Structure formats: structure tokens, C-alpha cells
Image: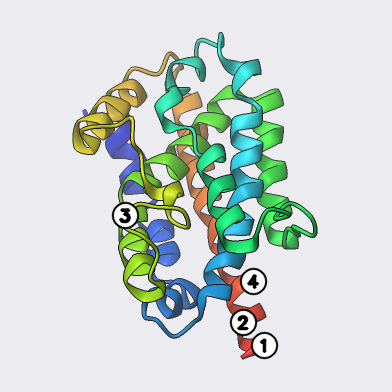
Amino acid sequence: MESFSTVIRTATRQQHAAAETSAFMGDLLGGRLGVEAYTRYTEQLWFVYEALEGAAGRLAADPVAGPFLRPELRRLGALERDLAHLRGPRWRAGLDPLPETRAYADRIRECAERWPGGYVAHHYTRYLGDLSGGQVIRDRAERTWGFEQKGDGVRFYVFEEIANPAAFKRDYRELLDAIPVDELEKQRVAGECGQAFALNTAVFRALGEEFRLTA
């Protein structure tokens, strides 16, 4: 019998590939967009992680979501340092979510309030993605726009408290495999993982449209 983490990876393979191969991300990583596009993307991430981490206190004691809320994963403080570097000390003024970003963050909050399993789906897709593909973004950003290696501007991608990312991801997947829900609920959680990828891809699509219009 397949582990739950394997079921999720199999069920979301297509959506994962769509997110990774979006035109916006391809142009960003290929150096065809400037630092303003990277900054705009980072702004959108702030709204997503504010929704994710704003719910952590409420869910800390929850038997389903609580075990996943590891403090070493928190990204909001790092994002704020990056935005201060990218936009200046008044970075919060005028920070504007795209409609697609707002929908993404709203869905995370809805799950946090009503459905811990759904919250885990969003937690998994975001943080394990940051520990994996996010490192490619960090490397390209450092090379393309001259950020100091693992310094301000790319701190979001630097998990200083995780010495061994591969081992951490393995432990995380073991938590998924042991999640205390029945098989029907596991199917629902896997479905929400697909929805999380779709919401993320919608943000990429909107960013791509924005920068094609302003190119």
C-alpha cells in the first residue's frame, strides 16, 4: 500500500509541473524579467505567508495540523527583511495583492478556520516547495540581480535553522504518512493539495500577464 505522501505526490504531479513550468517563472529564472518582477512576486508571497503563519497560534494544539507547525519553517520575518531590502523601509505602504493572491490567501484562512486537514495541504505544498525548488530561485536571484549570497533580498529561501533539508523533508513526509485522519479525509487533503497548486499557478499567470502588459 502506498504511503500517503506518495499518494499526494502522484495525485498532484500534473499541477506541480504546471506551476514549475509557468511562463512567468520561466521568464524570471531565465533572466528575461527584471528585479521589479522578482519584487512583485515577493510581495505576493507576503500575503500568502501572512495567511499561513497568522493561523499558526490557533492551530498549534490541533491534533491534525499542530505537528506540522515547526518554528524553523516560518518565513514571514525573512520575507519582511527581503521586502525592506527590495522596496525600502516603508515597504508595507502600498503593498498590493493581486486578485489571484487574495483568493489564495483567503482559501488558506478558510481552511485554517474550518478544516485543519485542508490547512495541512497548503502548508505542505508551500514549505516543502520552498525547501526544494525555492533554492533554484534563490540561486538565480543571487546570480541575476547581484544579491549577497543568502543575504537580504533572498532570505525567504534561506532556512538557517534547518541544517539538513533532505532529512527535514523526509521527517515531514513521515508526519504526513502518520496524519490522524481516515482514508476519506486523506482523499480530501490530497485534493486540496491540487487546489493549492492551482491557486499558486493562477498567481503566476496573473504576474505573467502584468509583466507582458508593462514590458
Q: Nearer the viewer, mark 4 or mark 3?
A: 3
Q: CA distance from mark 4 to mark 3?
A: 23 Å
**Counting other residues with Cα less than 10 Å from the Cα at mark 1, is it few (<14), some (14-19), or many (20 or more)?**
few
Residue at (38% x, 74% y) in the render = 29
Residue at (40% x, 57% y) in the render = 16
Location of the C terminus (image quadrant): bottom right
Q: CA distance from mark 3 to mark 1?
A: 28 Å
Q: Nearer the viewer, mark 4 or mark 2?
A: 2
Q: Foreground: 173 or 128?
A: 128
- Residues at discs 1 and 4 in contact (Cβ within 8 Å): no
Q: Foreground: 159 or 68?
A: 159
Q: Earlier in the sequence, mark 1 or mark 4?
A: 4
Q: CA distance from mark 2 to mark 1?
A: 5 Å
Q: CA distance from mark 1 to mark 4?
A: 13 Å
Q: Which residue is mark 4?
A: 206
Residue at (27% x, 34% y) in the render = 169
Q: How far across and down, in percent of the image, does residue 191 sit?
A: 50, 42
Image quadrant assignment for residue 128? top left
Which dot marks residue 135?
3
**Counting other residues with Cα less than 10 Å from the Cα at mark 3, is it few (<14), some (14-19), or many (20 or more)?**
some
Q: CA distance from mark 3 to mark 2?
A: 23 Å
Instruction: Please name the amino acid that badge 3 sits on.
Output: Gln
Which dot marks residue 214?
1
Q: Which residue is mark 2?
A: 211
